[in-house]
Amino acid sequence: MWFGNSKETLTAREIASWITETEDHALTSPEDGFTAYAQSLAEKYDTQGRPRKFRTSYGNTITLYQGDFVWKLDVEETAAALRENAQSNTPHFVKPVWSKEGGSLNQDSDIGDSYIEIDLENQKVWLYVDGKEILETDCVSGTLGTDRETPGGVYSIFYMQSPAVLRGADYASPVDYWMAFHGNIGLHDADWRTTFGGDIYRTDGSHGCVNLPIPAAQKMYETVSIGFPVVCYK
């Protein structure tokens, strides 16, 4: 099995070690062994709950802890794939089955080199594809010091719609480009704003979303896709 650049090998000898003889001379099934082996792989390669390093557009490296963008192995399905291939008399490469997929299997950072970067303190947004900067723009995020403040962490785009109507308890805002990445929080255009960036978010921020100028939102919408990483930090 390949995990990024790391290879894991399950040998016939190890599988055989999972089979034991009972008191009445019957042989036990290695069933539990496959599950335990898959669980050990999950403990080694899952990134959920682990800190990850991120190099910002300013050139410094920060550590990120929050968010739901992770690699998470489907232990039962991976065990089933291993068990099925173990029936063969010849070696096989088995593909791990993931319930959640990150961008890279690098243990320090699972984000990869294609992502949206949001600097909440300086109100800046960048878009990178394959390590190349595609877009840089000012933004307005959620109002500072309130329950509308945009959360930090690593997320991913899970829903996109164009056009869309964003609704809350006291508003309904039509937008052209909607890219959700955390609950009802996402990136979108905001034609009701004439300026972006600076200190606007301190007193007149959004309901939690990241407001963008229309051209920037359009370019981003046309570039990203479901699963695209979103990195927010302060």
Image (tube, rainbow, N blue to C red):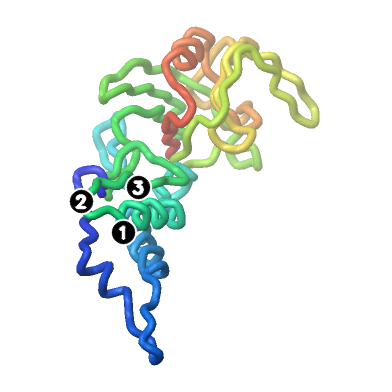
Dot 3 or dot 2, earlier in sequence: 2
Against 86, residue 222 (above or below) is above
Q: Which mark is residue 138?
A: none
Against 63, residue 17 (above or below) is below
Task: Look at discs 3 and 2 and give the one toward the viewer.
Answer: 2
What type is the residue that disc 1 sits on? Lys
Label 3 belongs to which residue? 96
Residue at the far front: name it.
25
Task: Look at discs 2 and 1 and give the one toward the viewer.
Answer: 2
Residue at the far right: name it.
170
Distance from the alpha carbon under mark 3 to that under mark 2? 16 Å
Task: Look at discs 1 and 3 and give the one toward the viewer.
Answer: 3
Dot 1 or dot 3, earlier in sequence: 1
Disc 2 crowd, CA 10 A, few/some/many (<14, 14-19, 20+): few
Q: Residue at x 56, y 22 (%)?
A: 160
Q: Which mark is residue 91?
A: 2
Label 1 belongs to which residue? 44
Residue at the far top: name it.
215
